[in-house]
Amino acid sequence: MHINITAQKTGKNHETYNSSVTDYVNYLEKENEGKHPELQEHFFDQNNNKVSPETVIAEIDGNTKKLKKRDPKFYSIVVSPSAKELKHINNDSALLRKYTRELMKDYAASFYRDRKVTVDDLKYYAKIEHERSFRGFEKKVEENAPYRKQIAKLRNDLAKVNRGELDGNVKKIQQKIDKLIADAPYKIDGKLVAEGMKKEGFQTHVHIIVSRKDVTNTYSLSPNSQHRKNTTILNGKEQKQGFDRNKFFDAAEQRFDKTFGFERSFIDRYSTKKLYRKDPVKFFTMVAGLPTNERELALKSLHKLNIPTNKKGVAFKLFQKAGLPVPSIPTNKVQLAIKAFNKLKKGLGRAIESGSIGV
């Protein structure tokens, strides 16, 4: 499970987001273009399965009392179940709507206030999307870039040769193009992965727009990372404020598992990823102490990250510091683990700093 919470884009270079949620709502309508009405995904809230885009805009834009011009008027929560989680629920939109409504109960309960915050205090609208496209900064796009560049030049040369503008052997140029395509590391149906290309497999995820103000347009409910469990003085009175992201992320994972009977592996737990960032040695200890079959699954999951490293021996040193019997784990698997651990640590840093979970 990957959950990301971000504030409405405001300030310089984001002027179109300053006063309205319109642009974001229109963006979320993109998958419905050209689809039969029965196949379209609609906005929904806690009680309604079909809310019009116009209603979403009017309700969110109209719920901003006393907020300053540069204050975020709403927050975006993106919930991205893993491929294993989506497979477990058969990629069912109805089940994801059910989960989202339960999730928002946990979101409300994670606020630290003088009174209990419930889902009935929230003004939110959610929408399910089924597609994702590759973005320019992603690894597969970046590593394919040199191949695409060479192929583009060769195809340009090929066109010039065919037009008689350049001397060359058409067959040899085409052979070079074919070889580059074959050698490129990432392809989908024989085509090189590039920015804008749709990703394979289940890509279903949920976008949630939640108002900064409560449903009465009276209280501010901000999940900003800088808001911790604390108190502040307002109008001469001490008031509680804050949002516990760790509590929310833990609850989100447990909610999915309990709702759908999903058995989450050790390596896929939010608490495990958090442990690695906080105490890598203890993390190593726990991985090594897993039952053989579960340890194998953990190492395979880490190996899928496939990040190369030249830090030979680092894994052995870490295991030795943890007092672990290194010979009990084959050398090649230890090296695979440390490669993945390095990537995992890097990913966790970005995820936690940005207020998201998952790697």
Image (cartoon, helix red, strand yellow):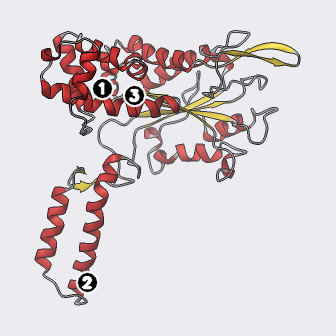
Q: Is residue 60 above or below residue 245?
A: below
Dot 3 amino acid type: Pro
Pick out the residue farthest to the bottom.
164
Q: Quadrant of residue 2?
A: top left
Viewed as shown, does residue 86 lie left or right of 313? right
Q: Secondary structure at mark 3?
A: loop
Q: Position of residue 238 (x, y in %)?
A: 81, 12
- From this viewpoint, is residue 265 visible? no
Distance of label 2 from label 3 (alpha carbons): 48 Å
In the rendered image, which residue does mark 1 sit on? 84
Distance of label 1 from label 2 (alpha carbons): 48 Å
Q: Secondary structure at mark 2?
A: helix
Image mark for residue 81: 3
Q: Residues within 10 Å of mark 3 (few under 14, many from 20)?
A: many
Q: Position of residue 215 (x, y in %)?
A: 72, 23
Viewed as shown, does residue 79 lie left or right of 153? right
Q: Position of residue 183 (x, y in %)?
A: 17, 56
Q: Is residue 85 above or below residue 133?
A: above
Closest to the observer: 329 or 347?
329
Quadrant (top left/top right/bottom left/bottom right) for the C terminus: top left
Q: Is residue 3 above or below residue 236?
A: below
The answer to whether marks 2 and 3 mark residues whose Cβ atoms lie closer than 8 Å is no
Quadrant (top left/top right/bottom left/bottom right) for the N terminus: top left
Residue ID at (71%, 46%): 18
Dot 2 amino acid type: Lys
In the rendered image, which residue does mark 2 sit on? 160
Q: Is residue 31 above or below residue 327?
A: below
Q: Secondary structure at mark 1?
A: helix
